[in-house]
Image (cartoon, grey):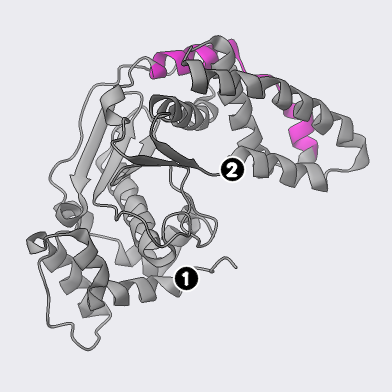
């Protein structure tokens, strides 16, 4: 189950409906990098990789923890299932991937931005999308990254503000939570960040993005960050609108606006002790929130829909 599957479950969808209207700090801004390529979905995925690489380079003197790229798993999933007549196709792509890896490694070390780096990110995006189409269609329709897509990535990349992605102690690239097939984009110190490469900033979409971040946050309480218990708690949620160069960031307590949040929750899911509602903005630390029985109950409720990875 991925994040979209989870949020499409009627009961979960209903549970996460409404309270995000309490968020008053709604981002707004002009699009500064309009699409150049007609392959906007591919460019969006490629930028996810590009921004993670940028974050890794920017913080190479700090502690950076990264997971396997989703593109690798998607590619090899198709590879092992492919019939023999398509074997040469996958071997050719694998050779190209191995030839491109030094470009990524050199960028992390030196920080030199090149067309080859943009090409590699688009190449990975194609890998990631490869498991969403039948193998025959993939083989027939595959093309190398387009020049317009490279120009598009370059334009979006030019808007990055380093201060948004510079960490003090530690950052996580593509973090997982030990539950289902779910991973976030970035965690910079205590801020969980989702990257959105979209043309318009819509209120309805923004609420959906906040829901997505809140699910990740709850998952981090259940399965921990990268399945390791001793982690600094997430205190902030962030969304980076890459085509706008716009970064939204809010404390979790403000997003939840917890009194109203739990009143709604316990009306639908009554349980012992639900009358003791607490405004978490009065707490001294997020650790206290994590230990509160009501938060624990909410985690257990969400667990009904999530398969635990063994």
Q: Is residue 245 visible?
A: no
Image quadrant in which the N terminus is located: bottom right
Q: Please, what secondary structure does the residue beneath circle 1 have? A: loop
- Residue 38, horizontal then vertical, whole percent: 52, 20
Circle on res. 123 = none
Distance from Cα at disc 2 to Cα at disc 1: 25 Å
139 sits to left or right of 303: right
Q: Residue furthest front?
A: 61
Nearest the eye: 165 or 127: 165
Q: Is residue 127 magenta?
A: no
The residue at 39%/70% (across/down) is: 302
> 103 above or below 209?
above
Q: Residue furthest right?
A: 84
Mark 2 or 1, nearer chain start: 2
What segment is highlighted magenta in the picture? Answer: 136-157
> 180 above or below 35?
below
Where is mark 1, residue-wise? 305
Q: Based on the displayed image, in which of its 4 quarters is residue 83 positioned?
A: top right
Where is mark 2, residue-wise? 68
Magenta segment main secondary structure: helix
């Amino acid at each position: 189950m991925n994040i979209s599957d989870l949020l499409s479950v009627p009961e979960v969808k209903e549970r996460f409906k409404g309270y995000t209207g309490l968020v008053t700090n709604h981002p707004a801004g002009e699009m500064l990098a309009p699409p150049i390529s007609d392959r906007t979905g591919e460019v969006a995925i490629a930028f996810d990789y590009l921004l993670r690489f940028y974050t890794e380079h920017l913080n190479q003197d700090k502690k950076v923890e990264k997971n396997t790229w989703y593109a690798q798993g998607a590619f090899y999933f198709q590879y092992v299932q492919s019939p023999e007549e398509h074997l040469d196709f996958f071997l050719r792509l694998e050779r190209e991937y191995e030839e491109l890896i030094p470009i990524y490694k050199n960028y992390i070390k030196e920080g030199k931005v090149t067309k080859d780096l943009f090409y590699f990110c688009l190449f990975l995006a194609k890998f990631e999308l490869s498991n969403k189409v039948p193998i025959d269609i993939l083989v027939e329709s595959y093309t190398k990254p387009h020049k317009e897509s490279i120009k598009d990535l370059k334009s979006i990349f030019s808007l990055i503000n380093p201060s948004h992605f510079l960490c003090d102690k530690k950052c996580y690239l593509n973090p997982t939570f030990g539950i289902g097939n779910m991973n976030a984009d970035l965690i910079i110190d205590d801020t969980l960040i989702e990257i959105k490469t979209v043309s318009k900033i819509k209120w309805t979409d923004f609420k959906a993005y906040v829901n997505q971040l809140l699910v990740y946050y709850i998952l981090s309480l259940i399965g921990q960050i990268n399945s390791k218990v001793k982690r600094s708690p997430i205190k902030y949620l962030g969304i980076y609108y890459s085509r706008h160069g716009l970064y939204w960031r809010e404390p979790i307590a403000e997003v939840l606006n917890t009194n109203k949040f739990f009143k709604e929750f316990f009306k639908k899911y009554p349980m012992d002790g639900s009358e003791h509602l607490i405004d978490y903005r009065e707490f001294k630390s997020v650790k206290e929130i994590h230990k509160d029985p009501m938060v624990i109950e909410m985690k257990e409720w969400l667990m009904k829909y999530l398969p635990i990875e063994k």
